[in-house]
Image (tube, grey):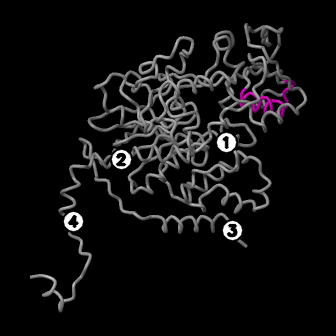
Amino acid sequence: MSPIDAPLDETALAELAQEELALLSYPDRRWTKPHFDAKGRQLYDVVIVGGGQSGLLIAHSLMRQGVDNVLVLDRSPEGYEGVWENFARMSHLRTPKALCGMEIGQPNLSLQRWYMARYGREAWEALDRVPRLAWMEYLRWYRKTLNLPVVNNTEVEAVGPEGDHIVVTTRRNGKIETHPGRLVVLATGFDGAGRWSVPEIISKNLPRSLYSHSNVEIDFARLAGKRVGILGHAASAFDNAAAALKAGATSADVCFRRPALPTVNPHRHVETAGCLANFPELSDATRWAIARYFREVDQPPAHSGFFAATALPGFRMHASSPWLDVRQEGDAIRVTTPRGEHVFDYLIAATGYMVDYSARPELATLSPFVARWKDRYTPPEGAEHPMLGEFPYLGLSYEYQPREAGTAPWIERIHAFNFSGAVSMGPHSTSISGHKYALPRLVRGLVRRLFLEQEEHVIPDLLAYKDVDLVIPPNLQSMAAE
């Protein structure tokens, strides 16, 4: 029996992972110097906003590099960080089960070892994709095993400069608190660039009680017996259709503007070591062209969601059916498309996100100072894209860049490790499948800055170092020195 086949439970696996970490710990000394603000408070070396999968991995990676003065903040209750038990409704992750990155070189921290410890080797081999709820259980085990410094139930209200550092202002249990840090990472997920987008044709013509975005919490029990209309063709459209029908909805109609549902997934093409590791080094023209192409062709819905929805009675989908008019008629909603009209009782907009710095409190202060792509790159005629132009133009370690050279240098102390980096860093830069290459890039940038800002101490500390390495016996001392 090979070591990977050995039967383990989660507790035993956690102990092995901790032993493994100790074996790999060299060099293990904390090396960052204490820094203090004007009030005498010690600064955190790094404050991470977001305690989901990225926030956990960033914290662990920094601690592996001897940077343990780290704070992770998350607004959700413990164990419910991220989307997985909030608005994510797919049964399985889209990412292949062979994904790796969270373990950063430690096999016993890997998803595969955890899943086998929980469910057995045969269950792992039978998997095609990882169940969504199992992924969340893995993240809980990962956080507990590594004892990561996450503070939950903490809402970030502002991020901004104070002297030569950054302050993150939060509200927790009704109390305002401030957390000063030398560097800040915004690990805020898919909507970290702004907000979920509901087309005005819906929001301006209907009361809020008659529609929702697909990526927020929905009381599906209220949709029992109702006709549900869904706008959009992506994964969340089919996930929400299945959820509505399973809750007792009479019907769920998915409408989209494309003449055919996409069947080719360009994301799989760019999942190579070369692209994932080096995408930010590409020219502006190439990065822009890739981002624009992905917006144009998009990707198919996930297999699990597509087949779950299409197998249910009451499901229908309509290609070439953008919504041209939406109006309330009594208790019903009439939707006009180029292919006819539909009557619904409730609408769900599976229409993605909007880049909107004013929509997120941690971005509001930054907005006037952050360079956008439209500030740095002018695309060829016909290749323009207003929304992509609003994405931040990031540095090679995910750091914001000043909108105007020589102004707001503090902005580079804030790193945007969220979907707002898609144009600068690549479409997978902050997704599960990109962690293996993206996290080392981010962490190298953070550690590099922390170290170089201590350059003035390098020589004095070296000269002051007097720890004795060799103890010479008394009988040899006369020969070892004059």
Q: Are marks 3 and 4 in contact (CB under 8 Å)?
A: no
Tell me: 98 left or right of 408. right
Q: Is residue 241 magenta?
A: yes
Give the mark nearer the N terminus: 4 vs 2.
2
Tell me: 257 left or right of 453. right
The residue lying at 53 percent from left, 21 percent from top is 388
Q: Is residue 168 above or below residue 131?
A: above
Which amino acid is tagged 3?
Leu
Write the start and end of the magenta stretch as one range.
234-251
Q: Position of residue 228 (x, y in %)?
A: 80, 22
Q: Which residue is mark 3?
A: 8
Tell me: 188 left or right of 249. left
Give the mark nearer the N terminus: 2 vs 1.
1
Give the mark nearer the N terminus: 1 vs 3.
3
Which amino acid is tagged 1?
Glu
Q: Position of residue 73 (x, y in %)?
A: 47, 43
Give the mark nearer the N terminus: 3 vs 4.
3
Which numbered mark, 1 or 3, is in the foreground of this view?
A: 3
Which numbered mark, 3 or 2, is in the foreground of this view?
A: 2
Q: Which residue is mark 2?
A: 448
Q: Are marks 1 and 3 in contact (CB under 8 Å)?
A: no
Q: Secondary structure at mark 3?
A: loop
Front residue of 423 and 370? 423
Q: Which residue is mark 1?
A: 85
Q: Which residue is mark 4?
A: 465
Q: Secondary structure at mark 2?
A: helix
The residue lying at 51 percent from left, 58 percent from top is 147
Which numbered mark, 4 or 1, is in the foreground of this view?
A: 4
Disc 1/disc 3 C-alpha distance (Å): 27 Å
Give the mark nearer the N terminus: 3 vs 2.
3
